[in-house]
Amino acid sequence: MLDRPHQPSSDEDPAKAPFPSSFDLRKEAEAAGITATLRELDRELIGLKPVKSRVRQIASLLLIERIRQQAGLVASPPTLHMSFTGNPGTGKTTVALRMAKILHGLAFVRRGHVISVTRDDLVGQYIGHTAPKTKEILKKAMGGVLFIDEAYYLHRPDNERDYGQEAIEILLQVMENQRDDLVVILAGYGERMTSFFASNPGFRSRIAHHIEFPDYSEQELLAISELMLQERGYRFSAAAREAFVKYIALRSQQPFFSNARSIRNAVDRIRLRQADRLVSDLDRMLSVADLETIDASDILASRVFAFPAAEVRTDGTSAPQ
Amino acid sequence: MRLTQGCFSFLPDLTDDQIYKQVQYCLANGWAVNIEFTDDPHPRNTYWEMWGLPMFDLADAAGVMMELAECRKVYGDRYIRLSGFDASHGWESVRISFLVNRPPKEAQFELSRQEVAGRGLRYTTKRRPAQQDALS
């Protein structure tokens, strides 16, 4: 349909000018903004080793592909559809946003925007409603990245007349025919994605990159919490940090623990308690240090400490937040 | 007879790349892009049929090109045009409109004259019936 109009066109007419014979890799990488984006990825995302190495590989491939094109070598645009699997709060959405930036920097997507959708945005309510709805979203995502969160909801195995199947078919068709126009990223929790792919083999084969997001270790969670606090202009006192280490150890044993998302919620609640503590004594003069320091008492007041982890684990009934 | 209507119609037909760029220009200006088709391309027929809904809020013209490809698949034997509607206050009208598809055999028109009182003349553009097209 389109003769790949987004391909970076060289300034000189390739028919007239000879191809350059050597390339400054550093300059190319910097021009594409990869070095900066990858550095940012390293700095702002803690842990996620396998994810980062995969992102780095993809970025390298795209860079080399671009240079090969300039050198006049055969360049076949790689398939870039991806699937991100992992537990809640492991950073799938965040990485998807970064991915769009990298792909845009390398001119493999033209605009670099991310359209984030779930089943409701794609699947209609009645016969004939699904196709226009899905197409509308696809049209919006063209030139960027379509991020489908909890993609396994598209397929409902218990209802064979579910409209989700129609959305899947349209998606597959566009993923295949318009690889140059958009990149689709599916995200979801590990096992459910596996069974989703098992019942839709077409999806599995059309996705080149299956990236697994591991759970965070306790040290990583602590580093994440400190980064979050730093972004919000707070810091732990020494005692508070110790208390938070304990908090993480307890919380991660409890049900409904969702990695970085739980930590973010905890940080928000800690801020509430800190504000409450400061306001409770109105006659005091506050210093800047008071305003930005989180005390151990702000953390220890959490309900998590009221439920010893072992107990919760055995009966599994209570879900303190 | 080559139909000339809207922008660019005295130029050679636009290629898909050129159409893509025009659409991208429309989207960048925030205009709603419509795909319309008709088998009655009379200059006074302003009511062409719409292919789907107007398209706005798109970041990239590839979505419009996808719809255009589909419209061509179904109505490749008719005239198809793209138009960009500017909804901003004070304009509220079509800002650009151009043909993107012609039937293999184009419509023929003729000018007919009608004598009226006082040797006056009235002119009408009339479409020639299909069998007469074959003769011309």
Image (cartoon, helix red, strand yellow):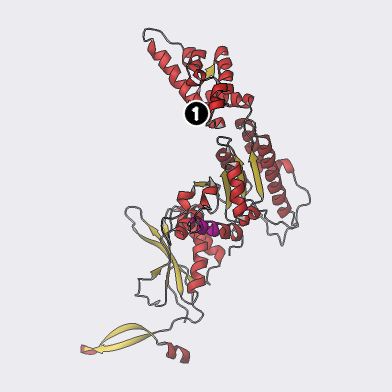
Q: Residue furthest front?
A: A315
Q: Percent position (x, y) of residue A218?
A: 62, 25
Residue extending farthest to the left is B117
Whether residue A109 appears in this view of the structure is: no
Q: Specify start and end residues of the magenta stretch as a single range.
A: A163-170
- From this view, report whether residue B101 is shown above or below residue A105: below
- The residue under the point 59% across, 23% down is A222
Where in the figure is residue B2, as x and y percent of width and height? 47, 79
Number of residues whose C-alpha sits closer than 10 Å to that of mark 1, classed few (under 14), some (14–19) or many (20 or more)? few
Q: Which residue is mark 1?
A: A317
Of the pair A62 and A213, the residue shown nearer to us: A213
Disc 1 residue type (three-letter): Thr
Near-viewer residue (A74 or B88): A74
Mainly helix, strand or loop, the magenta region? Answer: helix
Tell me if residue A132 comes above or below residue A188 in the rendering: below
Q: Check the image and report above or below for B36 versus A41.
A: below
Frontmost residue, A175 versus A32: A175
* Chain ID of residue with mark 1: A
- The answer, for residue B37, to whether it is visible in the render is yes
Extreme-bottom residue of the structure:
B135
Considering every residue shown, the one lying at the far right of the view is A21
| Place of residue A36 in the rendered image (x, y in percent of width and height, measured from the top left) | 64, 36
Residue at 58% x, 39% y is: A92
Side (left or right) of A66 relative to A266: right
| Picture quadrant of residue A226 | top right
From this view, report whether residue A197 is shown above or below residue A229: below
Q: Residue at x 70, y 59 (%)?
A: A14
Task: Determine whether, in the image, residue B8 is placed left or right of residue A25.
Answer: left
